[in-house]
Image (cartoon, rainbow, N blue to C red):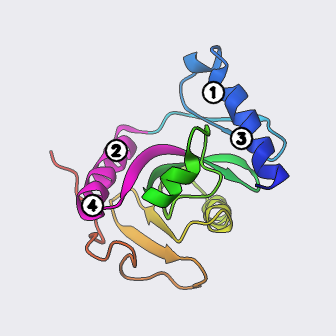
Amino acid sequence: MSSLTESNLSRWAQVISDTSLATLVGRVETDSHGKIILSPPPSAHHGSYQFQIGVLVNELIRGGRVITECPISTADGVKAADVAWASNQRIAELGEQVCFPHAPEICVEILSPANTDKEIKEKTALWFDAGALEVWLCDVFGNLVFLNAGREQPSSASQICPRFPAQVRLSC
């Protein structure tokens, strides 16, 4: 395990054990210096897409686990994937650690109107660098883009979960 990963895991253990942070509303992540980054809470649609994607992934892929708000050690601190799917092997690597030392195979980002293209490209690059095989981007209408490690262009479907729909619909 790299010293950066060890540092991220140590800092994340401090963050999640800090009871004063438990009262904050929003997503907590860290930067490359271990400083806390707080993002505002997402919209209800964001949470609905997060849940629906997690349910579908759970139904369509076996041999692993769906995780929401999945903490991942990256080159820029600990970042959280909205939804992730980790194989049993990656779950075993996690063990008793407080965040994933290597990204789960699938990391999903549900886009918010405030997200910039630059921000999403940076986060996608961090997840691929941390070992993700696919990054899925879900827009505000439920349309998905499937990105694969080592490929410049998006795919029309997931390689890991080819039956996953290109659009997620929310029930009324």
Please tell me the numbered disc located at residue 16.
Answer: 1
Amino acid type of disc 4? Val
* Sequence order check, earlier mark of 1 and 2: 1
Question: Residue at 68% of width from left, 50% of height from top?
Answer: 73
Select label 1 or label 2 by which is in front.
1
Give the structural element (helix, strand or loop) at label 1: helix
For the residues labelled 3 and 4, the Cα–Cα distance comes to: 33 Å
Instruction: Name the residue nearer the viewer: 40 or 87.
Output: 87
* Sequence order check, earlier mark of 1 and 4: 1
Amino acid type of disc 3? Leu
Q: Is residue 112 among what the camera can see?
A: no
Residue behind mark 3: 9
Select label 3 or label 4 by which is in front.
3
Question: Where, quadrant-wise, is the C terminus in this rendering?
Answer: top left
User: x, y percentage for residue 108?
Assistant: 46, 58
Give the structural element (helix, strand or loop) at label 3: helix
For the residues labelled 1 and 4, the Cα–Cα distance comes to: 32 Å
Please tell me the numbered disc located at residue 168.
Answer: 4
